[in-house]
Image: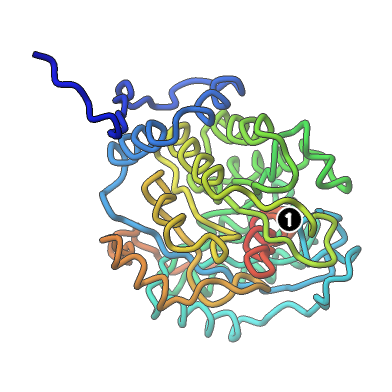
């Protein structure tokens, strides 16, 4: 006799075997994933995640603004733009000693990756030479290094690689057809060109986007499709929830439905199974329950520390408590590839390394 389900019992339909992103992802296919029943989507995302990553492994990355404010871009989410009155003042670039002090503190607190953001549209060669010194110094501590400095030329990417740069962050922000609604001082192709230069130099790519800028669901699908169809797709994918900063054009945007944000995390995991999917800007406003769902959906990296470039971030102690509650563990430094000492000495491109309160994170990682 077939057993009948209790009338108040919810039945979960077991999804097909986990898929891997072995070919192009049409926007329609990505949108279909976003529209799946949430629990089915989470099941598949967690299945894909466990097939490619150790259970419970979370990377802790720390972000430092080494050159704050005064960016000439007009990214609508970014408090570091010189076009918007957000109270952020342009500052000079930090020196090696200041950056090393912050990097050591991050390392002592458990971070394994250290990201440096500068609010430039496109750094000059003299700026790159200074950044190369910072990269080499941080690399010498044994940390993975990441930078987000805006648009790069091919020779600049090579210089950073020679200094020991492991990752370069340059977010696509949104789908190509919605991009000009957010930024008008550069073209989408400019971002893609920088990613090409970074890849050609042998630097790993950190590239994601921002959810909650007034985009439609199809634009969210378009963003994920763009990322997943890069060849190869990024090794690191930061997903930001817009932090609405007073003074920016997007300050009055409608808040993102938390479960819609979780869906984007899940679809990023399914379409880019081997990427680190990072909870980035906006994490402070999500709360513990939604963050837990994001980890279930396949997120396995967070920005860690009390500040993201120029904005606040969840307390480091609170983060460790949350990971402990969920039975997750911070990735140990021993799990990272050995870092040899180098002998070489958010820009808006990374979303301005902004996240003013989380936007500095999103901005900084654009």
Q: 355 or 21, which lies in front?
A: 355
Residue 321: x percent and y percent?
Answer: 34, 72
Most extreme residue toward the top, as rendered?
1
Q: 93 or 227, which lies in front?
A: 227
Residue at 34% in and 40% down: 46
Q: 196 or 265, which lies in front?
A: 265
Quarter occupied by residue 124? bottom right
Q: Residues within 10 Å of mark 1 (few under 14, many from 20)?
A: many
Quarter occupied by residue 280? bottom right
Residue 290 appears left or right of 209: left
Residue 235: x percent and y percent?
Answer: 48, 44
Residue at 42% in and 75% down: 318
Disc 1 element = loop
Q: Is residue 185 above or below residue 280?
A: above
Residue at 46% in and 35% down: 272
Residue 144 appears left or right of 258: left
Residue 129: x percent and y percent?
Answer: 69, 67
Q: 3 or 270, which lies in front?
A: 3
Residue at 51% in and 67% down: 114
Quadrant where the N terminus sits is top left
Residue 192: x percent and y percent?
Answer: 70, 38
The colour style of the image is: rainbow
Report the label total.
1
Residue under label 1, please give it: 150
Most extreme residue toward the front, as rendered?
7
Most extreme residue toward the right, as rendered?
83
């Amino acid at each position: 006799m077939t057993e009948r389900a209790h009338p108040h019992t919810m039945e979960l339909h077991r999804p097909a075997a986990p898929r891997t992103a072995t070919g192009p992802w049409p926007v329609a296919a990505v949108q279909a994933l976003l529209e799946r029943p949430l629990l089915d989507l989470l099941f598949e995302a967690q299945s894909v995640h466990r097939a490619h990553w150790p259970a419970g492994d979370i990377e802790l990355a720390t972000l430092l603004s080494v050159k704050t404010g005064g960016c000439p871009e007009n990214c609508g989410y970014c408090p570091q733009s010189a076009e918007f009155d957000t109270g952020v003042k342009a500052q000079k670039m930090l020196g090696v000693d200041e950056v090393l002090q912050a990097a050591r503190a991050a390392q002592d607190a458990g971070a394994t990756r250290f990201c440096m953001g500068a609010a430039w549209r496109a750094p000059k060669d003299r700026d790159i030479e200074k950044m190369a010194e910072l990269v080499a110094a941080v690399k010498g501590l044994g940390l993975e290094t990441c930078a987000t400095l805006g648009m790069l030329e091919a020779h600049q990417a090579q210089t950073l690689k020679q200094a020991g740069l492991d990752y370069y962050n340059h977010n696509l922000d949104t789908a190509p057809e919605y991009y000009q609604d957010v930024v008008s001082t550069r073209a989408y192709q400019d971002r893609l060109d920088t990613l090409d230069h970074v890849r050609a130099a042998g630097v790993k790519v950190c590239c994601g986007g921002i959810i909650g800028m007034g985009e439609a669901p199809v634009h969210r699908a378009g963003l994920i499709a763009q990322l997943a169809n890069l060849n190869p797709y990024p090794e690191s994918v930061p997903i930001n929830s817009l932090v609405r900063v007073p003074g920016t054009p997007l300050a009055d945007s409608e808040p993102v439905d938390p479960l819609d944000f979780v869906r984007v995390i899940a679809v990023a995991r399914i379409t880019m199974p081997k990427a680190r999917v990072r909870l980035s800007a906006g994490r402070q406003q999500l709360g513990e329950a939604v963050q837990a769902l994001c980890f279930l959906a396949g997120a396995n990296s967070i920005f860690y520390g009390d500040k993201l470039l120029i904005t606040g971030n969840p307390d480091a102690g609170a983060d460790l408590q949350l990971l402990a509650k969920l039975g997750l563990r911070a990735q140990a430094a021993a799990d990272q590839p050995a870092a040899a000492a180098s002998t070489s000495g958010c820009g808006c491109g990374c979303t301005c390394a902004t996240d003013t309160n989380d936007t500095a994170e999103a901005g900084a990682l654009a």
